[in-house]
Amino acid sequence: MDIEFSVHEQAFRQDVRAFLHDNLPGELSERIALGKRLSKAHQVQWMRTLNRQGWLAPGWPVEFGGTGWSDVQKHIFDEECFAAGAPKVSSFGLKMVAPVIIKFGTTEQKAHFLPRILSCEDWWCQGYSEPGAGSDLSSLKTRAVREGDDYVVNGQKTWTTLAHFADWMFCLVRTDPEARQQRGISFLLIDMKTPGITVRPIITLDGEHEVNEVFFDNVRVPVANRVGQENEGWTCAKYLLTHERTSIGGIAQNKALLTRLKRIASQEVRDGRPLIDDPLFRTQIAEVEMQLMAAEMSSLRTLAATQNGEVPGAESSFLKIKGTEIRQAITYLISKAVGPYALPFIEDELGYGSEPLLYTDYSSAATYQYLDARKASIYGGANEIQKNIIAKMILEL
Amino acid sequence: MDFKLTEEQLMLQETAARLVRDVYGFEHREQYRQSRHGFSDPFMQQLGDLGLCAVPFAEAYGGYGGSGVENMLIMTELGRGLCLEPYLHSVIFAGGLVDQLGTAAQKDTLLPQLGSASLQLAVALDEPQSHYQLHDVQTTAEAVSGGWKLNGRKSVIIGGQSAGLILVSARTSHGVRDEQGITVFLVDPQDSGVGRRDFATQDGRMACELYLDDVFVKSSAVLGAVGQALPALRYQQGRCMAAQCAEAVGSMEAACALTLDYLKTRQQFGQPIGKFQVLQHRMVDMRIELDQATSMTLLAACVADQADSDERSRILAAAKFIVSRASRFVADQSIQLHGGIGLTWEYMLSHHAKHLLMVARQFGDDDHHLQAYAKLLQVA
Ligand SMILES: Cc1cc2nc3c(=O)[nH]c(=O)nc-3n(C[C@H](O)[C@H](O)[C@H](O)COP(=O)(O)OP(=O)(O)OC[C@H]3O[C@@H](n4cnc5c(N)ncnc54)[C@H](O)[C@@H]3O)c2cc1C
Ligand SMILES: Cc1cc2nc3c(=O)[nH]c(=O)nc-3n(C[C@H](O)[C@H](O)[C@H](O)COP(=O)(O)OP(=O)(O)OC[C@H]3O[C@@H](n4cnc5c(N)ncnc54)[C@H](O)[C@@H]3O)c2cc1C
């Protein structure tokens, strides 16, 4: 047993820290520190910086532009990025569709799509969920019928994050309606500019437009844009899920949030003292910090296992459940810390305006972040579904 | 012990329920929210015309002499409809303060106007540093010839954006956080030196920040004895907490009903999701929390208008604590059981959830009331 990072890993951490110090624009880290929303332009700005350094796609094989880092190095990188207040990179292209293309795509698909993801030329969205197919994803109905060199796609996707900004969608469609559920699904790459696609906004409870409904009306997609075999799309879909599992616990993000909570609780006052000195509030911070410590160890154990060549199993569902619960607990405490100032709903303060802030720099973001964290136990496989997976795969119930 | 409502109380409940049902559909609420005052002036007027705004006031002022139970009945219905009108803050809270502290002349002018909904009031007690502590008042009032000069800042005043007068607590003597030396003033937002920043709240209401910069008010604007306001503030906030609990119960009932309905209709894996036992038990937990909250709300309603005592304070703190916790649980879980749908603006559920989450952010959160109760804990 040795829980220390190696000398090499520690040196790596210093390198990452130095890079962030020199390259992360203060304007971006300030926005993040205040819990404000980020525009696509903000994200692209940061992704371009990472790409220039060759650090945009740590998860990819080196030959396609990856870094060749170990999983522990990737974890260190994530941790340093969040700690410094770097924007999260958009995962749909980099962490979702790219690994699928790398694993199952044709040479042409790799040559065409991968460089465009790295250069931020193409922005991706994920077309999995449908009104009738949420947790029960494999009941999806969007239909693709082959006509010559094209598929003709009809149907509807929903909850499609950032579809309104996307150039491309990776999409699960049904190509064989006769086959049993998981069979008969294909994985298509769809150009969002194709005629017949309509994107309609869904406004979420925080007033934000992030998710959409996407309608397909006789949309023609070249057969060349199918990844993997026809009717074998579920293999791609599942591969994508296992691939992103290890980072889903959000340890690095939670650590940064906890730091934020402590800063806020130190600034807020109750009875003329910093709130963080209020014994009752302080114990609640301590409690969530202890939980985060345990979750981090679990996450590192999972990483160590994959490092040794093991495939992350259903244990990664532990990480997702604990990670989202901890995030919800921290954002709850932040909202508690700001007291009545959790009430204002001032969209300008979250957005891009420079209007003077109501009271403190962080109060408008408090409730927004709490509500945002509610999403985390629903998407990426709801927590109830994660528990079903654990019950089945680990406990064999 | 008798949990039955009187004939009159049943009628009151039915009147409020019908009124809300008739005019507070989701689309309407969205319109009211976006209108000038952030709520429906006609609906507020209707509440006045039907006598609902006069319920808590004595007959001498055109009221019905109602107590905590009547307030509870009305507030539950307003909560069920997520009504945006500042009934709680204007009629119950401000009205209660005027009633308890006001001179005969002040009561004669203000209470009938409140009762007929021709006047709306707001209450400004919180400050940036006060964190729910009513005695942590840094806004100052200095005696000057013919009146007082006010300076300071008041936070998150629900209904302050449209109030005719705002009841402001200010320090007239004694040091920081002293229980003595707090006075309430009636401030006209139009007066010179009064600055306001209006904003929406998470649960769809409007509120404001108040900035007082050498604001002169006449001696007649003092409400109650100079320097002696704190006990009344605490007492009236207690009445308000009881009423707010009822509002939360109405909202929880609505959220639970929507969720239960969804469990029966939403199909996944070839069956209604309500067939999954884990969701059944979660729904049951929500119902149990609601039941506990309902019980504490009843208890609070029964003591809200009793004379001040440690027992009353304990019960009100306990009610607020239990209801705040229950509200958060119901909010979180009703979203979770809905999946993505629960997070959409276009569906009433998300607004109930936001309302329920904000219950704890007014009049003290669960920590505040836990500590208050612990302080009053009977050891032997
Ligand atoms: C903010 C946000 C962004 C999203 N972005 C995308 C995106 O970009 N692309 C995309 O394809 N999808 C996206 N989704 C969709 C997301 O994947 C689905 O919301 C999720 O799969 C759950 O499906 P549902 O919302 O239909 O809920 P449902 O599946 O209807 O679930 C409702 C409730 O029932 C529970 N439940 C369902 N089945 C079971 C069971 N067998 N046992 C126990 N409990 C069960 C669930 O856990 C949940 O609590 C997004 C969702 C959100 C909220
Ligand atoms: C101190 C004590 C005194 C008792 N005294 C008496 C007595 O005087 N007379 C008498 O007749 N009996 C008595 N009992 C027995 C008692 O009624 C049983 O223990 C009880 O009915 C549970 O049955 P079980 O112990 O066989 O557990 P099981 O029924 O085997 O249950 C095991 C677990 O499974 C859960 N479970 C079972 N079915 C379901 C389901 N459908 N859905 C979800 N969860 C489920 C249970 O909740 C429990 O957690 C006593 C038990 C105790 C512990």
Image (cartoon, rainbow, N blue to C red):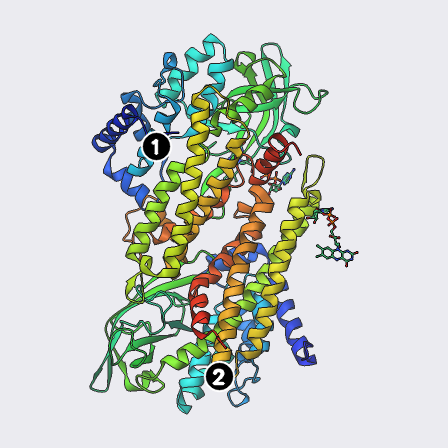
Q: Residue at x 52, y 25 (%)?
A: A242
Q: Residue at x 58, y 27 (%)?
A: A216
Q: Secondary structure at mark 1?
A: helix
Q: Residue at x 53, y 69 (%)?
A: B319
Quadrant for residue B236, please give it.
bottom left
Whether discs 2 and 1 lie on one chain: the answer is no
Image check: A239 left or right of A76? Answer: right
Q: Secondary structure at mark 2?
A: helix
Residue A62 in view, yes or no: yes
Q: Residues within 10 Å of mark 1 (few under 14, many from 20)?
A: some
On the image, numbered disc 2 is attached to which residue?
Answer: B112
Is B95 drawn above or below residue A388 in the view shown?
below
Quadrant for residue A38, please give it.
top left
Which image quadrant: the N terminus of chain B? bottom right
On the image, numbered disc 1 is attached to which residue?
Answer: A43
Is A386 drawn above or below residue B79 in the view shown?
above
Q: Residue at x 62, y 50 (%)?
A: B282
Q: Position of residue A91 (x, y in %)?
A: 43, 29
Classify mark 1 as within 8 Å of ligand 1 or not, answering yes or no.
no
Front position among marks 2 and 1: 1
Q: Nearer the viewer, residue B63 or A45?
A: A45
Disc 2 residue type (three-letter): Pro
Image check: B41 left or right of A82? Answer: right
Q: Chain of mark 2?
A: B
Disc 1 residue type (three-letter): Gln
Q: Position of residue A266 (x, y in %)?
A: 29, 55
